[in-house]
Each structure stands twice: as structure tokens, then as C-alpha cells.
Image: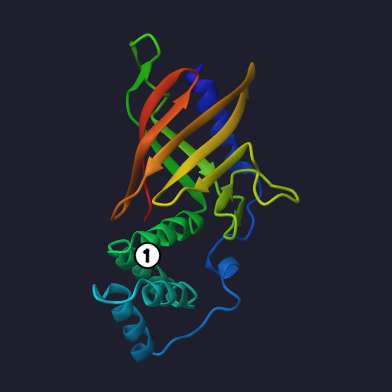
Amino acid sequence: MQQLIFAFLLALTALPMAATTAHAQCVEMKTYSRDETRQLMSMLVAPEADPLDQLFSFEDLMCSSNPTVRNMALKAGANSSSEDVRSQILFRALAEQQIIRVELGEGRNSDGTLAKFSNGVIEMPVIAVNAVAGCISFQSPGKADCNQKHHIQLMGPGIRIFNSVRIGAWQLLRGDLAYSFGNTLEGELIFSNTTYPVTIKLF
């Protein structure tokens, strides 16, 4: 059963992917001088900086035409002292990925027995991003803000995952992951009455 579930989720990666990289999040990509880049990066990492100034600096850096600068902005901003800034960085880090890779540990069934989810990895394709609604869809949302059955929702300093899959009957892969600092989201996902500890690497 678990192998079938994993194969179904992995097959979703074959769906055509929308433009969800930095280009889709920016009105235009910008070429900053070295001094401009240093100034923006200094503001982003300054511990005494106003959170709004940090946020604006981060958004400017994420519209840089240089992908290395964008990657550096994600890593630097992940250690901001502002939870709001880190929340925005969390969302952008997920939106920048083509496939969100979820690593699952050993699960626990409702009766207390242990369970393993196939090879311990779920890969979910980023199909559409709605920055206003704070959601990332794994399948086309059509005219909606996001696909309510297949999406990640930003929840302050973390995310909530909803992913309906049909194995015999429709079942929901769901759970919350928390984010504090750095590169990793951690939490639990529930599927078919089994709870799995999970992690997502942001970059």
C-alpha cells in the first residue's frame, strides 16, 4: 500500500509546471551593482535593522538577475531576528523550488505499532504559487487562489500541508510543519491513520 501511495505522489511530478521561480514573483529582474548588492545584504543581516527594511531588502535581492545573489539572500535572511521576515523567506524558499522534497521518518499507527513509508520520501511538484494568498499548489488551481485539495498554506512561522490522494478511496495527507531559523522545516504528517515525523530542507 505504501509503495502505491508513493508512486502516485511521485507521478504528480510529471505534470507541467507553471513559472514559479523568482521571475514569477518580480515585476522585473534587476541587475544591481556590487555596492548596491552589498548595501541590501548588509541591511538584511543587520540585527538592529527595522524588520520592514529587512523585508524590503530581501524582496529586492530576490529580484536580482543573479541566481547566486538570490540564494545568498535566502540563506542570510533565514537567520533574521524577525519572525515576520523569516516567514516571508520560508515562503519564497519553498516557491523557488521545482519540487518540494519531504523526508519521512518512522511512523506510528493509531494502534501504536510502527510503520515505514516506502523509501521515506515524498516529492511534491510546485505547479502554482499565489503570494497574496500565501499558498503553493501541487496541481493546477484553475481560477481559484490555490488548489484546496493539493496545496501548502503559509501559517505564520510554518506551513500546513493538504494533499488528497486516491488509493481506493480519497484520503488526506495532512499536517503542520514549524520553522524557526535556518534550513529546515520540521513537523508531522498524518496519512491513513499513521503519523510520520517529517522534515523539509529549504535550500
Q: What is the image's colouring? A: rainbow
Where residue 36 appears, as percent x and y from the top left, is: 38, 88
The C terminus: image quadrant: bottom left
Instruction: Give the residue at the far right of this rendering.
Output: 143
Identified at 75% across, 51% down, the residue is 143
Residue 97 x/y as whole percent: 48, 55
> Which one is nearer the viewer's eye here, 11 or 160?
160
Hey, which quadrant is residue 86 in on the image? bottom left
Number of on-image labels = 1
Q: Residue 70: x percent and y percent?
A: 41, 70
CA neighbours of label 1 inside 10 A, class few (<14), some (14 to 19), many (20+): many
Q: Is residue 63 above or below residue 114?
A: below
Q: Residue at x 28, y 55 (%)?
A: 181
Looking at the rendered structure, the kind of residue marked 1 is Leu
Where is 94 relative to 30, above or below?
above
Front-most of residues 79 and 62: 79
Q: Secondary structure at mark 1?
A: helix
Looking at the image, residue 81 sits to the left or right of residue 172; the answer is: left
Where does residue 91 sit, x and y in percent of width and height? Answer: 46, 56
Residue ID at (44%, 61%): 88
Q: Residue at x 64, y 40 (%)?
A: 148
- Residue 12 sits in quarter: top right
**Furthest-left residue in view?**
47
**What residue would you read off at disc 1?**
74
